[in-house]
Amino acid sequence: MATFISVPLKKSSEVDLVKPLSKFVTATYPAAEEQADYIRSVEELNKLRKSALGRPLDKHESSLEILLRYYDQLCAVEPKFPFSENQLCLTFTWKDAFDKGSLFGGSVKLALASLGYEKTCVLFNGAALASQIASEQNLDSDEGLKAAAKYYQLASGAFGHIKDTVLSALNREPTMDISPETVGTLSLIMLAQAQEVFFLKATSDKMKDAIIAKLANQTADFYGDAFKQCQYKENLPKYFYFQEVLPVLSAKHCIMQANAELHQSLLAKQKKRFGEEIARLQHATELVKTVASRYDEYVSVKDLSDKISRALTAAKKDNDFIYHDRVPEVKDLEHIGKAALVKATTITPPLSAKFTDLFEKMVPMAVQQSMSVYSQRKAETVNRLVGTMREATNLCNGVLASLNLPAALEDLSGDSIPQSIVEKARAIVQQGGLQSIEQLIRDLPELLTRNREILEESLKMLGDEESTDSELRSKFSQRWNRTPSGDLYKPLRAEGGNFRSVLDKAVQADQVVRERYNTHCEMIALLCKPEAELTAAIPSANPVKTLQGSEVVSVLRSQLAQLEEVKKEREGLEVEIKGVTFDMSSSFLTALAQDGAINEEALSMSQLDQSYGSYSQRVQASLRSQEELLGKVQASHQEFSKLKKSNSEANDREEVLKKLASAHDSYVEITSNLREGTKFYNDLTEILLKFQNKCSDIIFARKTERDELLKDLQQSIAREPSAPSFNVPAYQTNPAPTAADPTPAPRTVFPPQRPPPPAFTPQAASAPGNPPDNQPQPGNPPPMAPPSQAQGPPYPTYQGYPGYAYQMPMGYNPYAAYGQYNMPPAMQPNMQPYVPYQQAPAPGQGGFPGTPPTQQHPYTYQQQPQHPPHQPYYPQQ
């Protein structure tokens, strides 16, 4: 009776994990040492997959350990890589474990770009291998029984876990082997077998009959539930696997019920209930006889049957001669209790005892995404503070330039170049002068064009693939059951739209910088000239040397020095603000471990306030100090202007000096803007190249998926019947059982029963020259209707071609055993002469009795010529 059910493994196609994962690591982790470690881990993961799925696995615990370790690694790596169709796209292809396919069509398989699909299939293989290992255990030893129970419960838990998670993991209809109905049934079967192992253990340990009976009754219930599950699900019996399993489940249900009744009868005997003992043994006998008559091909119950028979014979003998106890009906017997000692193993990674995370140092994607958002928030905070200080500095420079300070204080002689102007001119020349600005301006359009080409090429690839997908979808309609490219590419197109808007804004900013350069180009060119030419270009004025010792001049110089000090403090403050660092990964990891999710906004804002709150206060203090000093400078400058003697020459000179000072400030700002623009375009080029790689990767994955789907569609079309279905002749079906026969259990592996011998009328042996009434006549009449009683196997003919029929092999007579020459002489007079199925005679052989004359039709196949009839031929005995 030791027949246990095991599950076959799924087969997977080879997948290269190294290339896509390495590209992601290279793009995400720029640090060389960290990058090298992760790439080595990727290679180890690829080797682990090949070990777990790329070769046949032995039915041993070490093979199961490899499978479970790969499953644990998938669970660990899933949150650390963005596995999806539109990000890190890896297509996994698996074949149906039960569908063996056809000669031309191949087996059913499914390809999905989903790591959840890979996890589900790997866990299915782990459960299947556990069931195979359990079925190979030696159940005569305690170690074997314990191992079998352990692995069956593990298989039951794994199948149950797949049932609960497969639909959410795939987001589409799975293959039948991993559908919730199938794995739910397999989980029940494994649990029933685990309970049976405990029953065998209790039997071998000779535990109390009451306990064994309860264990057996619970086992019978488990098998009954599994059998009902198979019957209720319409798709399961289509599998040949389940057609083989159904009889085993039904047989084991009966066997375990018989065992429960046997041990309960022993308990009844101990309690002096001899009638109950006989009733239970009789019920057990009926159950065993049912198994022996219907399922003997699958399980053997000879030992159990003999044991029950001996017990029943002894019980009847004792009751008839000694006790004379009344034997109750089976329906009146007390129900046997139940005891479930098994429970499906809970699937909680890690399942492998030897598991070590290859990517232990890599933070999960949730933390990476939170870190990315935090970095953006931090950059916005830094840019806001730095931008505020730079705006204040530009405002200060603009106010001083409008007042011609400090040049007005240095130009008291009226005929020499102020020292501040000389220093500004020297600074411009050192930075490259006009040539450097013009070169930067010429480079911007080239950088812009390069970025636009990369972006447009990326979007064009998406558009081409989407149009191909749409054409195939319209061609194959519902058969093209993959995610539409238009839906899949929405995030990528949105990202591309953002890049396009960024480029448009950058073009506008470039135009503003170019216009500002054109405004100050003449004065910047003047500052780039030698000092003699610069002196000649500045108008001279009457000297105002009397103001050199004035108190107003001293106050202005002191106030300007204080402003310079404020600007220097801002430069140092800007360096400090940009240098602030804080590792938020530990905070995010702690939140993820405690709450299962990360409230990024709350954690980030709290940390940013803590890190930059004091700097924000210092920036505001600097702004207030500058505003106060500028007010004082403007008041002092008014007094200074009153002391100066105003004339046209002095005004012209002061206007030129103001323009030169403003030109210097504009040169510095324009140069800074152009360099920032160049850096922006170069950085954007790297980002757009990553975007292009992402698009090309997903398009390559979609192309691979498209080719696989086209191949599957071709195979499915090849499997479809090329002709409409037709009715099966009545003689090819099994006869309906009579009321006296028991209803057989579902069995599909037995050959069909031999049909009964046909009945014949005297006309069946008519002379060869007299054709039957139903023989078609010349003139192409309509096809004959089938006779009400078969005159031999009614092989079909093609309509419109009377006289042509499928030919049977010569000399073959399936009903030879019923011929009159095989019957006893006493019975032969009562028998009608047997006429075998007639066919066209071979060349050189005469026709058979009862053979209708050949009618040649213009559209029929050429028949063999008729010969004179001869005596009937029967196979020689």
Image: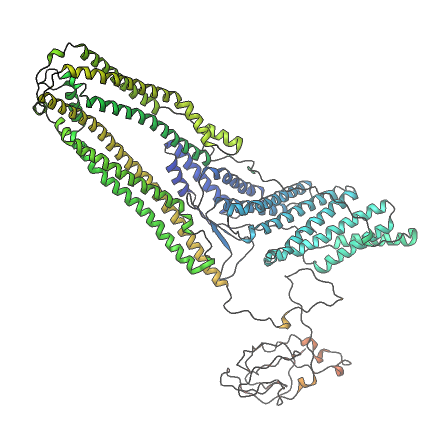
The location of residue 484, given as percent across then percent down, is 43, 52
Q: Is residue 652 above or below residue 636?
A: below
Q: Residue at x 68, y 86 (%)?
A: 763
Q: Residue at x 14, y 19 (%)?
A: 418
Query: Which quadrant of the rendered structure holds the C terminus?
Result: bottom right
Residue 2 visible in the snapshot? no
- As drawn, is 524 to the left or to the right of 790? left
- As drawn, is 245 to the left or to the right of 371? right
Front position in the image: 642 or 142: 642
Front position in the image: 837 or 268: 268
Q: Quadrant of residue 367?
A: top left
The location of residue 839, given as percent across then percent down, is 59, 81
- As drawn, is 452 to the left or to the right of 838? left
Q: Quadrant of residue 301?
A: bottom right
Q: Residue at x 64, y 47 (%)?
A: 190
The location of residue 830, given as percent across then percent down, is 76, 82
- As drawn, is 65 to the left or to the right of 613? right
Residue 226 visible in the snapshot? yes
The location of residue 396, given as percent across then percent down, is 25, 22
Front position in the image: 114 or 395: 395
- Counting labels gives 0
Q: Is residue 443 above or below residue 464?
A: above
Q: Residue at x 50, y 54 (%)?
A: 109
Q: Is residue 671 above or below residue 500?
A: above
Q: How is the image coloured?
A: rainbow
Front position in the image: 158 or 765: 158
